[in-house]
Amino acid sequence: MWNETLSYARLRQYFHVVFHSMIISKFQTYGLLMGVFVFACILYQSVWLVSGKTDAQVVTFDRGAGRQYKTIETVKVQYSLEGKQYAATYLRSGTSHLQKTVAIKYLLFAPSWSRLDNVIGNWGLILVLAVLYFFVITIIFLTKEIIPMNATFALKSTPPFLWRCESSTEQQKS
């Protein structure tokens, strides 16, 4: 038989529910922030899964200013959908200077938004953001001077959704 008081007491050991807010630990907050990022990446990629594909004509290759005498190489393309012309500029990302056409993906509801249909075009942005996000969040949560080891966070259903709770020792110091 399922006992309501036992299950509620067990739930309260992990999450302290107070006035529509939930108190979570530092480790749980880290997991929550990583989970939200992964969910956002999956949502972003799922939009591109239902996108259209077409071939675009290479107009020109170009070079932009980079750091320390290096240049950023780009490719300018032009494509037409349903009689309307679109132009876009992408990082070259391995496109040969001999190519006259490149495969691109475009959003069905916004055809002017497109990207190269290759590994870098499909996953480059996600991978760069994931590495940066992971390192920044991990460093913030590992450094005891930024977030103490026994810190707790409150999670609410109204803005601000997440904030750090002051511990009793911090309140005594002030």
Image (tube, helix red, strand yellow):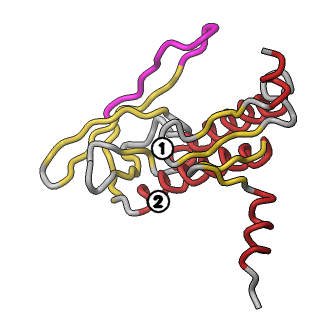
Q: Residue at x 53, y 50 (%)?
A: 40
Residue 1 pos. (x, y %)? 77, 91
Outermost bottom residue? 1
Q: Which residues are magenta?
A: 59-71
Judged from the image, the secondary structure of the residue bearing numbered disc 1 is loop
Disc 1/disc 2 C-alpha distance (Å): 27 Å
- Front residue (pair 108, 93): 108
Residue at left 40%, top 51%?
103
Q: Of helix, strand and loop, which mostly describes the magenta segment? A: strand
- Dot 2: what SS? helix
Q: Vertically, is 55 above or below 70?
A: below
* Image coords of residue 127 (percent x, y): 63, 43
Which residue is at a point 65% across and 44% down the rendered structure image? 33
Q: Is residue 62 left or right of residue 16?
A: left
Q: Which residue is mark 1?
A: 158
Residue tagged by mark 2?
46
Outermost residue toward the top in this view: 68
Residue 10 drawn above or below residue 141 = below
Q: Residue at x 45, y 28 (%)?
A: 74
Task: Pick the quarter of the image with the C terminus.
Answer: top right
- Mark 1 packing: few (<14 Cα in 10 Å), some, or many (20+)? few
| Residue 94 horizontal side relative to residue 10, left or right | left
Residue 19 picture location, percent across and down: 58, 49
Q: Amino acid at mark 2?
A: Ser
Left or right, 84 with reference to 25: left
Mark 1 or 2, nearer chain start: 2
Q: Quadrant of residue 29?
A: top right
Across and down, in percent, residue 95 comes to 50, 40
Is 69 included in the stretch rendered in magenta?
A: yes
